Image (tube, rainbow, N blue to C red):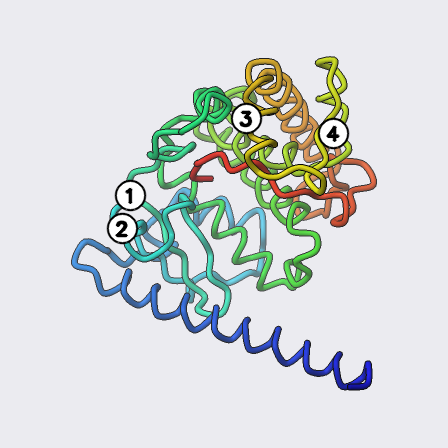
Amino acid sequence: MSWVARRDMIKKQILQKQRNEVAQITENVQKVIKSKITSTKSVSDYPSIKSYLEIAFQGVDLSDVKIYLTSPGVMLRYGFERCAGCYIPHLNIILVKDKIKMGGNKVPQTLFNKLIQKEVAVEVDPEDVIVHELIHSISYKIGRSGNRKFVFGEEEFVYTNCVDFYRSKGMTNEEIICGTFLPFCVNDVMQDFRQMGKIWGSIGDEMPDANKINKAAMEKRVEQNAHSLSRKIIVVAKERAHTMIDLYEKHGRQRVHSNTAPNDDVSLRMKAIDMDCDF
């Protein structure tokens, strides 16, 4: 088989996989929507959010975005347990849990995960998630979110453009960081290869090479350094959150901020340690 034929075959396989995933998501979403527990909302049902977004993103119509509020149990049953809320572009809808605990409801199985969850576990008002997901829908409508390579940049755009809304509710920067930003920033840090290398170095150890040791050996090394690693990760994550807010204040809303991880490259992202968390 020529390289051209092989390339075309791989492309077809990828496209088919994507179609299958979209079909499965669509099927699961319909099950969530049809649940007796699920209620249908729109942006008009949240006047403070509607007013904020109309000013922040003038000219963007959100009247066609349907919001479905449902229980954590329904989200769990149909495969959405790991998100507090999500915007689904091809359906132009938002799913949101009516009771949200960042960090998840599962009991962590390792010391490292327990220490991280202790820092990020906080109850969140569904309204705070709804404004976040609506900004994702705005980003999609204005053509910002097409390139998944820069998914972290997209999330930074959304998180920072929620800041003024959170402040309008009387939240301080520290409350915004601990109440909304921290889980994302922890995940960001843990997937930053360079940063994690520095964190391991700061505790007097070398970061294990995932290509040279198996998962069990990796988890053992992490557990041996659980307290030191978790403390450092939280400190760096909070610093990144403050940087995100500082950039927002400096450059203003609706601007694509530079990533808080300088020279961020998707090839330097590594699979985050499973935190058993619901971000």
Q: Which residue is mark 1?
A: 98
Q: In the rendered structure, which disc, 3 or 2, sits on the residue that comes first in sequence?
A: 2
- Residue 177, label in figure: 3
Left or right: where does residue 277 sit relative to residue 226?
left
Q: Are marks 3 and 4 in contact (CB under 8 Å)?
A: no
Looking at the picture, how far across and down is residue 119, in whole percent?
Answer: 48, 21
Q: What amino acid is found at the position of numbered circle 4 in the picture?
A: Gln
Q: Secondary structure at mark 4?
A: helix
Q: CA distance from mark 4 to mark 1?
A: 35 Å
Q: What amino acid is found at the position of numbered circle 1 in the picture?
A: Asp
Q: What amino acid is found at the position of numbered circle 2 in the picture?
A: Thr
* Residue mark closest to the camera, 4 vs 2: 4
Q: In the rendered structure, which disc, 3 or 4, sits on the residue that comes first in sequence?
A: 3
Q: In the rendered structure, which disc, 2 or 1, sits on the residue that comes first in sequence?
A: 2
Q: CA distance from mark 3 to mark 4?
A: 20 Å
Looking at the picture, how far across and down is residue 54, in whole percent?
Answer: 51, 51
Q: In the rendered structure, which disc, 3 or 1, sits on the residue that comes first in sequence?
A: 1
Q: Secondary structure at mark 3?
A: helix
Residue at horizontal 29 percent and vertical 43 percent from the top: 98
Q: Are marks 2 and 1 in contact (CB under 8 Å)?
A: yes
Q: In the figure, residue 30 lies in which quadrant? A: bottom left
- Residue 195, label in figure: 4
